[in-house]
Amino acid sequence: MPALEVLVTDLAFGLLLGCVFAVIAHGLNLIWGVAKIVNVAHGVFIMLGAYGAYFLNLYLGINPLLSAPVDAAIGLAVGVGFYFGFLHRELRGKESIAQQSEMVTLVATFGLALFISNLALRLWTGNFVGIPWSPGSIFVGFLQLPLGALYVAIASVAIIALTHIFLSRTYLGNAIRAYSQDIPATQLMGINPTFVAAVGTALGFSVTMAGGALLSVWLPVGINPGMGALYAPISFVIVVLGGPGKMWGSLVGGISLAVIIDVGQAFVGTSLATAIAFLTLIPILLFRPEGILR
Amino acid sequence: MSRTLEASEIHKYFGGVKAVQGVSLTLETGRIMGLIGPNGSGKSTLLNVLAGIEKPTKGTVTVDGRRVDGWPAHRMVGLGVAKTHQIPKPFLAMTCRENVAVAMMYGSRREGEPASALEESLRILATVGLERRADAPASNLTVQERKRLEFARVLATGAGLVLLDEIFAGLSPDELRDTIALFARVQKEQGFGALVVEHVMRAVMTLSDHVVVIEEGRKIAEGSPKEVVENPAVIEAYLGSEATNVTP
Amino acid sequence: MKIPKLPAIGPTLWGIGVFLLVLGGLAPWIPRFTLTILVNLLIFAALAYSLNFITGLTGYVNFGHVVFMAVGAYTLGYTVGTIRLHPLGGVALGGLVALVLALGLGAVTLRFRGVYFAIASLVTPLAGLNIVLVLPALGGGQGIFLNIGFDPLSWFYTIWAIIAAEVGLTYWITHGRLGYGIRAIKSDEDAAKSLGVNAPRLKLFLFALSGLFAGATGGVYAWTTSGIIPEAAFDLTFSLRMLAMIVIGGMGTLLGPLIGAIAVYLPSRFFLTIFIGTESIIIGLVVILIALFVPGGIVGTLRKYVPELRRILE
């Protein structure tokens, strides 16, 4: 039985990491909720966000926290591109995705994932890189918390909260929510479904890439082209845990997952804790597919 | 085949919504029972429970004395109980013949191999007047043709008890007359029993031996078509609008 | 259970059969190096056929198919390494263990809707990898190293037998009663169930088959590489390749996996000299284009646009 201090430290780190996990999953949650598309390539966009922060730091000296908005802007453009490249054909006027189209999208986005990640491998080599940014730590009791982790955790929650405000308080946001629930009704209200779906998707990608930038703070030597293969499944598990389409679900799912891994590894080691964390997906899908949140 | 299905005190709740609250009825081969009621009264849910698509929250369903509540749909079909869909669900990529062949091979008769099933399918399609569309892909069919295909498929399963979900909906007066006649003839020839859920009063009244009326998940009346139509509770439930459309 | 009579043999099956027989007959005279390449091609093809059983026929996308291959590879590695079992035994056992895993996994995950099944399948290789890493009996992070020698002819005939079985089974399934049930499920699972198709059992049957053959093939793979390491066993690139092969060849078809394997494998031999990552870039791109614009793959497209071929190509 590990010492109490160790457990509490793990818990604290789990909470901080969980917030970042939440924001990288949040983008997927948005796209899933709006376009009802499961983007298997989600991981590569996290990776691109991380690399974005890396290069911004390398060439312009910008720290990851400030890179996040830049990445977010890039993400918007990428999202629009993705929408018109992939989704527009499938979604045009249809009320929901037919099973055949679902399969097509899954396979196509899978292809996209490997296309982009291997392209990245070609361009940037497989070397693991990181961003040297250490604003120091603060002490809370016996806990030593890195400020970088704290800042990005706060930023992550802020991003999630902002999207929540946007979706519930603005006209466009509400249009997006309406679209995700009932496309014909949205049309009947004079809202252009294509525009709305594109914006929703763009928002999702924007959050994802910003999340990648924030995640990079936790990866001082971990940024590499293949990282999407790890963070895509993590994002999926988080969205399922929290409930697809539930805005705060990302936070709940993200923190739960990170805590399970961080606290779990004190008992059974990282590998097993990670395996267990992933496998929680299955009981959730079996018994509570709407997610943990009511 | 001769079958009796007894549903006893069926309750079905979806979370807080009590869709069906204590309905009992008995279906037998050879007899047609009409099930009517205002929108949202629980008719479709009840059908789904009987077909095995939903499990009853409470209550029992037996077929020839054997308890089958909770049995999945495909097992119910094996027993000879099959349901059509309110909005037809044909296998779009397959031809009409192939659609019916699936039902023949997997239904209660388990008609062997594809070759013989495809042959037999033509006969069944002819029964419902779709023989000219036998080799057309189901995606090319009109809505009315799709409804007939639904019916053909259910017949092909060899069901002794057929559950029909609003099969007469959306038809023009001429189409309605033809479809009612078709159904009556086929039923007489094949002898199956049926539970007909309907809003189209004319069909229900013409075809049913016995009618059950449901409102808000509960049975509020039952009897012969004539009795039911004159029942004040029934008239009140419908606010008189549809009941006055009945041609005696 | 009565055995249904075998359907008549169609032209495509003849073609593949003759191809395999000729290849099998010539094998002892093929130079060892070429034979090794051929064996690798056949391994790809066998994997494609195994994925075809589940993803090709039912449309349930299994991203994690590589897990079965890994299980087979590790079974061979363990049994040959520890109890000195003959590799053929390892292959058979590998298939069996993977079969059991498929039954267990499938009983749970096949209940999910297609999308959730795909997600669960995405997660399983990672979980599997992490579990294997902590098992010292399976070599932990190092993997298993065997010393069983270089025997391309045996490898060839083993994988040959696996493919023959797969092709035969694929034909039998698609042409008989099961073929209709499967098409019905793929088209509209609920409607199929409402007509008496026991969808859960059918899907599980196909999933189990896919696991069995992927496991056996994984065993052959470990045999050819004389061992197995975790990163190779659980490499998602395998899943990509398998998916690419059936997408490019034509999902659910008889010839598709073979054509797809050739289409994916031969170019990859080229690119090995250029750069490993390039292969995946191109495969990824091709998969995107085919999935979006040519969903029938090579076989599907040929059948669609060349009506004369429809009777003989499947």
Image (cartoon, coloured by chain):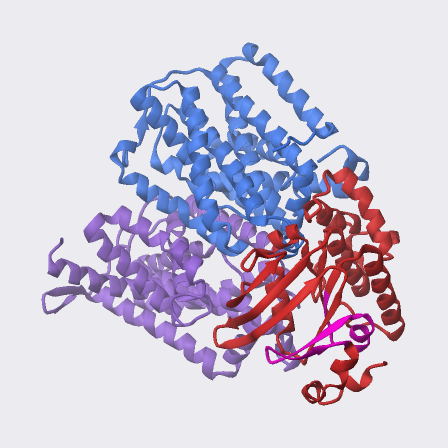
Chain colours: A purple, B red, C blue
Residue C263 x %, y %: 60, 34
**Residue C109 visible, this orientation:** yes
Q: From the viewer's side, name the closer residue of C140 and B189.
A: B189
Q: Quadrant of residue B50?
A: bottom right
Q: From the viewer's side, name the closer residue of A180 and C167.
A: C167
Q: Quadrant of residue B47?
A: bottom right
Residue A42 x %, y %: 45, 57
Q: Which residues are magenta?
A: B195-224
Q: Is residue C16 left or right of residue A272?
A: right
Residue C282 x %, y %: 54, 42
Residue A17 x %, y %: 28, 62
Q: Is residue C90 left or right of residue B76?
A: left
**Residue A46 visible, this orientation:** no
In the current view of this chain or complex, which residue is farthest to the top?
C29
Total marks placed: 0
Q: Please report the residue visible at 58 percent of the width from the left and 44 percent of the height from the top.
A: C202
